Image (cartoon, coloured by chain):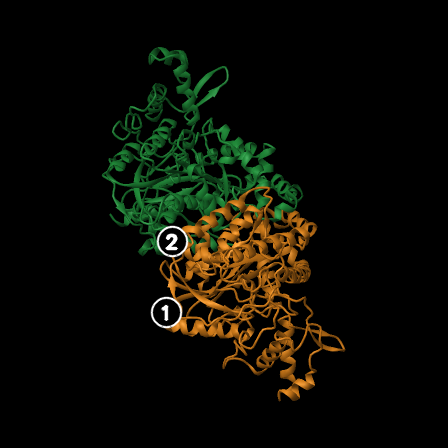
Chain colours: A green, B orange
Amino acid sequence: MPDKVEFNRTPRTKETVPSNPGITSHTKRYEQVAAQIAGQIEQGALRPGQKVPSLQRIHKQFGVSLSTAIRAYSLMEKEGLLECRPQSGFYVTPRPPAPPQPAPKVHKASRVEMGSFNKGELFEIRAMVEKELLRPDSEVLHLGTIELNPDLLPLAALQKSTAAGPRRVGPKGYLYNWPPGDLSLRRQLARHYLDRGLSLSANDFLTTTGCTEGIQLCLDAVAKPGDLIAVESPSCVWSQVFIQRKGLKALEIPTLPHKGMDLDFLEKSLRRHKVKACLSIPSFHNPTGSLMPEANKRRLVEMLAARDIPLIENDINGDLSFGGAPAKPAKAFDKKGLVLLCSSFSKTLATGLRVGWVTPGKFYGEIKLNKILGTMSCNTFTESSVGHFMEQGLYRRFLAKARKFYAANLQAFLGALPRFFPRGTRVHRPQGGLTLWVEFPKGVDSFRLCREAMAEKILVLPGPFMSSQGKFKNCIRITYGYPWSERVEKALETVGRLAKEQLSGQK
Amino acid sequence: MPDKVEFNRTPRTKETVPSNPGITSHTKRYEQVAAQIAGQIEQGALRPGQKVPSLQRIHKQFGVSLSTAIRAYSLMEKEGLLECRPQSGFYVTPRPPAPPQPAPKVHKASRVEMGSFNKGELFEIRAMVEKELLRPDSEVLHLGTIELNPDLLPLAALQKSTAAGPRRVGPKGYLYNWPPGDLSLRRQLARHYLDRGLSLSANDFLTTTGCTEGIQLCLDAVAKPGDLIAVESPSCVWSQVFIQRKGLKALEIPTLPHKGMDLDFLEKSLRRHKVKACLSIPSFHNPTGSLMPEANKRRLVEMLAARDIPLIENDINGDLSFGGAPAKPAKAFDKKGLVLLCSSFSKTLATGLRVGWVTPGKFYGEIKLNKILGTMSCNTFTESSVGHFMEQGLYRRFLAKARKFYAANLQAFLGALPRFFPRGTRVHRPQGGLTLWVEFPKGVDSFRLCREAMAEKILVLPGPFMSSQGKFKNCIRITYGYPWSERVEKALETVGRLAKEQLSGQK
């Protein structure tokens, strides 16, 4: 087996890049302009670091108003494709050569299946991964589960807010903190989402023990066992776990690079199936890292609302945008109280805070009651501590630092993959979040890869974890929370070698 | 209607007091001696404050060894019936005249029914109670839900432990605190239970978000929807809620005064029904306050173990004993890992800590996994803070104070009830815990009483909340967490008046 197989760096042909996959009758003019210029960047006509045509030129070239040109560039800046240099103009965001993205596939009609998460090989691997995660003082590098950069933790400031909690809250800190939870935190959450283009009041939030409790409360409120839930394919492990634990069925909706859920496909599926709810990660999808464009978010919300179908928006990565502007949640387009946004601080600030929230919309009463019947109340001090931390502007400052770090770290990962991974590997280019979705050439068995990597003290997640139908056998999820290091580089090299060995063994 | 109806103070006749309701072939000789002397106290032959026969006399009179006599008196001391005055002897514990206890009933064969918690009048009242509980700044006196005496809260010490948490735990306080949870707390729990006659190691515990999460995790581990759970009748609201939410069926087992679950009845039921698990509160049962004698606990554990049936032991009141000695948990008799003890600090130290624990026994792996899939991890700081608080001996000191307070407060409540409640009312005399189970004469409708009391800003819980079959329509639960005050006295008077009005209206 050759040791150094060149990664496939041939530029993407027209066939593999859809001209405008997300453009439909719902798309606005400025979004069409943005999509065309994005296409030029994608195809290499505009290179990283290169200056893009001036607003004046766009105005003339596309025959659009100057304000439309400005909105197009603002959108692209938000999506991380352009950056604005003061008194100079807009430039293509510089990035190192990255592995090619997967080609969008022609998706067949949707198929409904009960999950396979508790069966056969997937179950065995799951048990192995779980065992590893709970091992204290493990020497395994957790390259597939989400780990935050420990150096980012604003320890001193958090400690100060935490330690001040008892005196700030007083005796009521030791009494039931009945839902909807600590008011000071909910006020800060409302303020925070305003920056992301979502206008809500403190009373629209209900706190939960992490995002996981929130999603489960939402599923309980909107669906009962046997009901059908539309969910991205692939989608995060927790989506699979919850759908299966609750006896629900998953309707897998394919995802498109840089678009998230394929809305045309969803629309067709809604006509064929009685979908009870949609569970989606529109902002920095896990595992692909895609940011669903605002126009698509609006279309998603409207499409579901027209059928009175609730949307559970998993927004846990929503703050981890790498572009210039924050990502507007789909909830911002909600007019009927049907969008239930769930999130927490576990993928940004710290995994162990267990401070999450839900915007229960029209399901407020039911979710509040179910929260009480489940874990009753949340921890007052922690909620109040995080509220205090936010109040001082420290969360906003922290986020700016975290976004910068993960965006740069991602580039290191993306730059390394072509060196190590087999030719023909395709990797989604995340617009935010913490996960990388790697599609190896058919023939790579991710279960075997996961087992063999574990033997070399590396944990990656096999693709079938991300599908209720056990799809994506040739895929793995990698995360880039760990700061780039020689150890991480070696681990990626090992994973690449193991994949190559599988492919060469089949020749 | 007369304003002052005398409470029924006629001494209990032989018919209403069973000679030895709990004595079976399993009962030891010293327990028989204790039961006989207890019977004399119960019937007024030995009065509160009176000296009981010397050990020598018991030795001769009953023809038992001196050590058996000592064990009998020790048991009665433990149960709060006797007190030992140094260099003087044993005396009947002084207490104000209390209302009579209910007569044990002849229980018919067990009947299995799906719960009625979500139907009809019970549902309406439940909604009213829930609404009231979540109202901020309510003026209603919560005389039916469990409230702790706020003056007992060791605020300064807790604040000190909480505030010191961040620095003591360091950065790992902000990371996932994977099950089984904080080691320092689990070590303290093991030490604590040693004082209660239960020998476990830190590794036998797994922390949970309160006792409620623990019980739900246990139910999930041992039963699936449709399975039959044996549970006391009456039993705490949460037992009903969890059994119904999980689609389980309840097999109601009657309770006996000062004995808890009727084990003869349980034994017969186990022969007739396929019981999947038993959910019980052996120590200071909610709502009756009964302490199941140690011999019965052993019998319960052995009876279930012989059939491989897990026992979920709700021990949340276990530390609130009013007798001389701590109550040994049923878990102490577990030889097969089939007893899953669940508890928390919510009914002792503070309701809002959300620090609970489970001893998952042979279900350890499954419960650990389900904890992760549910709320993932608990809050590190709070767990570590409580661990710190216990380590300094502060929890033990706090408990001594709390037990003394609630025991005295209970006497104030018991003394007042005969003055206000209608003739024929019977009240269980709690041996610990925080709840009083009041049986009004038939004819009192507790739903109506609950509604009318609420109109007068008093919340009591109607009996059918405590039964999955909606039994106990003439009963209410009262709690004595609030320190005795004129307001509490007035509230009891009002509740009594409302009950009397119902009875007189029917004449």
Foreground of the two, B407 or A188: B407
Describe residue A146's horizontal placement relative to residue B315 as left or right. Answer: left
Give the chain letter at badge 2.
A
Question: What secondary structure is found at the residue carrying circle 2?
Answer: helix
Give the Cα distance between marks 2 and 1: 37 Å
Describe residue A49's horizontal placement relative to residue B19 as left or right. Answer: left
The answer to whether the residues at label 2 and label 1 have Cβ atoms under 8 Å apart is no
The answer to whether residue A138 of the structure is visible from this angle is no
x and y, in percent, of residue A147 in the image: 48, 44
Q: Residue at x 44, y 72 (%)?
A: B265
Q: Residues within 10 Å of mark 1 (few under 14, many from 20)?
A: some
Q: How many numbered tags mark residues here? A: 2
Question: What secondary structure is found at the residue carrying circle 1?
Answer: loop
Q: Which residue is mark 2?
A: A126
x and y, in percent, of residue A4 in the image: 34, 41
x and y, in percent, of residue B154 in the image: 68, 53
Give the chain letter at badge 1.
B
Q: Residue at x 51, y 71 (%)?
A: B104
Describe residue B27's horizontal placement relative to residue A446 as left or right. Answer: right
Q: Amino acid at mark 2?
A: Arg
Q: Which residue is mark 1?
A: B273
Q: Nearer the viewer, mark 2 or mark 1?
A: 1
Q: Residues within 10 Å of mark 2 (few under 14, many from 20)?
A: some
Q: In the displayed structure, would residue A51 be above or below residue A172?
A: above
Foreground of the two, A455 or B360: B360
Q: Amino acid at mark 1?
A: His
The answer to whether residue A118 of the structure is visible from this angle is yes
x and y, in percent, of residue A388 in the image: 60, 37
Foreground of the two, A302 or A361: A361
Instruction: Give the quadrant of the N terminus of chain B.
Output: bottom right
